[in-house]
Amino acid sequence: MRRWKVTVVGAGVAGLATALEFSERGFVVEVIERGRALGDGACSWMAGGMLAPWCERAMTDEAVLTMGAPSIDWWARRFPGTTHNGSLVLALPRDATELARFAERTRNYQWLDEAGIGALEPDLAGRFRRALFFPQEAHIDPRRALPALADLLKRQKVAIRFGVDMQAIAREADLIVDCRGLAARDVLPDLRGVRGEMVVIRSREVSLSRPVRLLHPRIPLYIVPRGGGVFMIGATTIESETRGGASVRSTVELLNAAYALHPAFGEAEILELGADLRPAFPDNLPAVRRTSRSLHVNGLYRHGYLLGPAMARQAAEMALEMELERPDADLREWRSA
């Protein structure tokens, strides 16, 4: 049986992961992207890149943990820059109850005392009394990981065509896999945008080896090391579809939270401020939906790198079933539908 030609629309993390899963199963794959370069207009370019299913479980549905945990190995096999140093969750003494509440909602952690915190992160020694350590978690740098996936696709003879609109290929593919994020609201009207903002800084005085979350009743913070003294601080979650740059209020809150983590961050250099809209369904969980001869991978919300591989696998498995349902003789009629 002739393998289908599959066009993946969108070169963010969902699109590239999906293209890899399809290519690895023998489909003939191409990726098209309306942006002019990798990361152009993709919210995944500004993500934290935390592979932290147990931390995320404390704030969301069990499905995020179930789908997300296998993604750590998925990334490790495909991106050598995956860092397995775990995650550290802290709270200031006045917010100690937040740490206990967080622990009650998840698992696979270790309690640390002051000495344990200092052993993991020497620059935080003496600053916090207790912490939760999630040793199985990992993190990646999205701005290194996306090019790495693109290189993998190139080695598998998968072309990525930039500056191409979806309508231009509507009749060329046997199957279209739509990974456009919020742009797919023309066919997925229940998608909404959730605003997120982040700050990138450089500090010569603070060193961290793993993502650190600082719990706060109003402004939870995560700070992810990027190497070379660079840190990504994020991220707000605002039920708003307002586009534009990061707001003064959110920037001040994120920087204040970083200063609370360590006062030396007050001397850090601000490298970048960013904001974008994350695509989310009403339940904040991703889905693969089928319409006509298309699959739609969407709703990754704030879990693109964690849940993208799971959605990509699901889409590829659905396509295998669809391919078996549709013999070659039916393709011309189906493609013209």
Image (cartoon, helix red, strand yellow):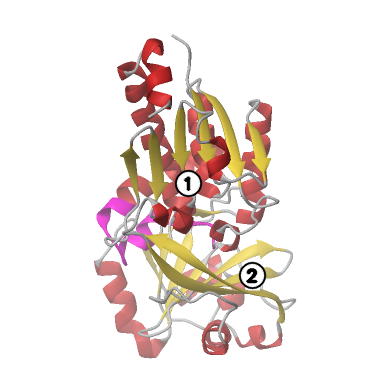
Q: Residue 279 placed where, x, y %?
A: 42, 60
- Give the secondary structure at mark 1: loop
Q: Where, quadrant-wise, is the C terminus in this rendering?
A: top left
- Give the secondary structure at mark 2: strand
Q: How many labels sit on residues?
A: 2
Q: Find residue 35 and name its label.
A: none
The answer to whether 15 appears left or right of 91 in the picture is right
User: Label 1 belongs to which residue?
Assistant: 179
Residue 281 makes an appearance in the image:
yes
Structural crowding at the residue carrying mark 1, measured as other residues with C-alpha within 10 Å and reported as few (<14), some (14–19) or many (≥20): many
Residue 52 counted in the magenta span:
yes
Tag 1 or tag 2, which sits nearer the N-term?
1
- Stretch in magenta: 48-64
User: Label 2 belongs to which residue?
Assistant: 231
Front-lying residue, 162 or 315: 162
What residue is at 58 percent from the left and 39 percent from the top? 168
What residue is at 59 percent from the left and 32 percent from the top? 30
Q: Residue 336 placed where, x, y %?
A: 42, 27
Q: Residue 269 placed where, x, y %?
A: 73, 80
